[in-house]
Image: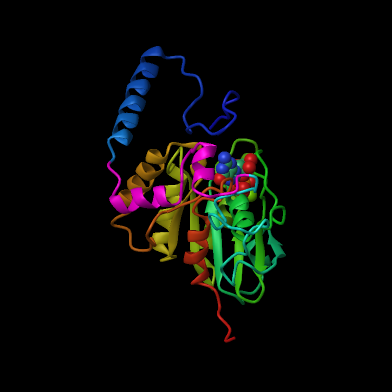
Amino acid sequence: MKIDPYDASNKRLDDTPYQKENVEENAEENVAEISKNAQFRAIQPSTSILSFVEENLLGRRRLNELTNAGYNVKLSAPLDNIPFSKSIERERIEHAVFRNKLEFFAAAKISSSFPPPVLPEIAFAGRSNVGKSSLLNALTRQWGVVRTSDKPGLTQTVNFFRLASKLCMVDLPGYGFAYAKEEVKESWEELVKEYVSTRVGLQRVCLLVDTKWGMKPRDHELIDLMERSQTPYQIVLTKSDIVFPIDVARRAMQIQESLKKNKSVVNPVMMVSSKTGGGIRCLRSVLSKLARFTKP
Ligand SMILES: Nc1nc2c(ncn2[C@@H]2O[C@H](COP(=O)(O)OP(=O)(O)OP(=O)(O)O)[C@@H](O)[C@H]2O)c(=O)[nH]1
Ligand SMILES: [Mg+2]
């Protein structure tokens, strides 16, 4: 895998060699790529997916579309607010779980240092740079608590955060990036695999997939493992603000169809943008159902 120096929006390329000396092979690859694109464009998303995308204003949108719908574009993640809100401040997070202070409490490089599983746990997995740490911040609106970076491979340990005594959220190191040494990469990947297949109290793995790029071989590898260990996982499409709304819908449809026969997958495919806040409220609703509820 190589990093594309000219692509400021998304640095990842396929795991294929960057430059091919063999021109014929290159031409063949181009044809395959074109037909892959044509197949993608031919996907007909279901009406429920299409209306989810429209209702949540997902995908690349003009600013005036957001203002016309009543969102205050001066706020960060404006779609994560109530439309036509009269309040100058941002409206409170509606979910009792995600309103709590996000507290970092443990980091582990080896499985023996995982903290005891006391709370229901949700983990965020996915390729490096897919937006795992950003999503944790966006869900809690506590930007800065979880460190994010545009340099892939920032999160290098399994990091545990708690939301009061209700939920534990786990930020996993990303897999498949170019900078780290082979042996370091392998040890992180092994740690992630061990975590998702053996962790007691793990309620769900949110497997984050970049909307623009879709699923890659390493995502399938992790899915196969979670199927074998019967770990419930849900696909969350990230960075949906980068592509056109129709392509967000197509990607969700494509993934939903490809996992139709899987047993441990939790539907539906969620779609979010930590940047615009699109889909974040829905994801909170889905995930807060897994939290521990204490009687009022
Ligand atoms: N446009 C856009 N960029 C995003 C979004 N979410 C994250 N990013 C950017 O993507 C980059 C990587 O985000 P992180 O949250 O650090 O990704 P990560 O998956 O935690 O990465 P690792 O820790 O390396 O595995 C940062 O530059 C973010 O600003 C999003 O919804 N939209
Ligand atoms: Mg991270």
Instruction: Tell me if residue 139 comes above or below residue 155 in the rendering.
Output: below
Q: Position of residue 65 (x, y in %)?
A: 49, 41
Q: Is residue 269 left or right of residue 257?
A: right
Of the pair 21 and 138, the residue shown nearer to us: 138
Query: Residue 50 colored magenta?
Result: yes
Name the image quarter holding the C terminus: bottom right
- Residue 186 visible in the snapshot: no
In the rendered image, which quarter is residue 3 located in? top right
In the displayed image of the protein, which residue is found farthest to the bottom? 295
Give the residue at x 32% y 49%.
258
Q: Which residues are magenta?
A: 44-73
Instruction: Tell me if residue 289 comes above or below residue 245 in the rendering.
Output: below
In the displayed image of the protein, which residue is found farthest to the front? 86
In the rendered image, which quarter is residue 101 located in? bottom right
Q: Is residue 39 left or right of residue 13?
A: left
Give the residue at x 46% y 18%.
20
Give the residue at x 30% y 30%.
38
- Residue 71 visible in the snapshot: yes
Query: Residue 154 colored magenta?
Result: no
Give the residue at x 37% y 18%.
25
Q: Position of residue 112 (x, y in %)?
A: 65, 67
